[in-house]
Image (cartoon, helix red, strand yellow):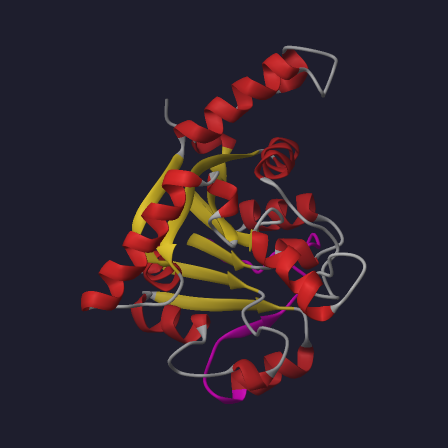
Amino acid sequence: MIDWRRLTKDPTNVSVSRQIDQFLGSITRIEETSRMEMLLDFCRGKSVLDIGAAEHDTSFYSPESWEHEQIRKVAMRAVAAEINPELCAHYNAKGFDFRCVDATSDADLGERFDVAFAGDVIEHVNNPIALLQFIKRHLKPGGHALLTTPNPFAPRFLMHRRRDRTRYVMANLEHTMWLSLSNLHEICLRAGMEMHVIHWPLYKKRKSGFKRKLAILGKRLQLAVRPIEQVFHEYAVEIRPVSERKD
């Protein structure tokens, strides 16, 4: 991580911005996997805190595609943090372990986890720094967290504007912000976290055989002619507390 304040008083300094860009490039990993496979590899055999696991509404529940269901299958233990009490009651009745808590608060669940996952959560909250501090509070020593968030530079959002005939680009109406990688870099600095790996899975859903090879080839061809942020719909960033940094 690069603390730009130690190098300049100007947050628009081009030279320092290039240094941060080089750092982000050094931790970028383009991976021949899917989002789900990346997530399950991250959680396999570990104790997991899954933040915002309920995904808005019970209609999202599906044993095959609901990420928390899949996490629970591979994790040593999976606990969900969810702010909506009705959703917590619903999933606890199904045998899941949901804790009704605001993950941007000072609350402490009294447990520590190997890893935390916040899938498409940070863009919904009032205070992203408080979210990262909540995550940090609940990690064991050496613990990591995985965050995903929509990539604001993805062409699909401009396509949505044309499709929906809106004057402005519309996000999910519950989103409070768009986040770029430079935004996440600054949020991590302020929260006492560091970006460890930027994951770019080469396809969205799990595939096998010819379909998998075709999806990988398609993304590789796009990457050959387009900037990386115009190829992927979302960011996936692995972070960890600064105190756990290993040089």
Total marks placed: 0
Q: Position of residue 240 (x, y in %)?
A: 47, 39
* Residue 46 at least partly seen: no
Q: Look at 71% across and 70% down and name the residue there.
A: 164
Residue in the image at 75% along x and 67% along y: 165
On-image quarter of the C terminus: top left
Residue at image position (33%, 65%) is 75
Q: Main secondary structure of the magenta part?
A: loop
Q: Is residue 117 left or right of residue 104?
A: left
| Residue 74 image position (x, y, % from top left) | 30, 68
x then y, percent, for residue 88: 60, 79
Left or right of 116 in this view: 14: right
Say left or right for 168 vs 226: right
Query: In the image, what residue occupies the spot 59% across and 36% down?
Result: 188
As drawn, 229 above or below 37: above
Does 149 sit above or below residue 183?
below
> Farthest right residue?
167
Please give the range of residues in magenta: 93-112
Q: Nearer the viewer, residue 122 or 136?
A: 122
Q: Quadrant of residue 86?
A: bottom right
Q: Is residue 202 left or right of residue 121?
A: left
Q: Is residue 105 visible?
A: yes
Up/down of 218 relative to 93, above or below: above
Whole-percent x, y for residue 51 in the image: 55, 62
Relative depth, front residue between 1 and 86:
1
111 within the magenta span? yes
Residue furthest out toward the bottom = 93
Q: Is residue 71 magenta?
A: no
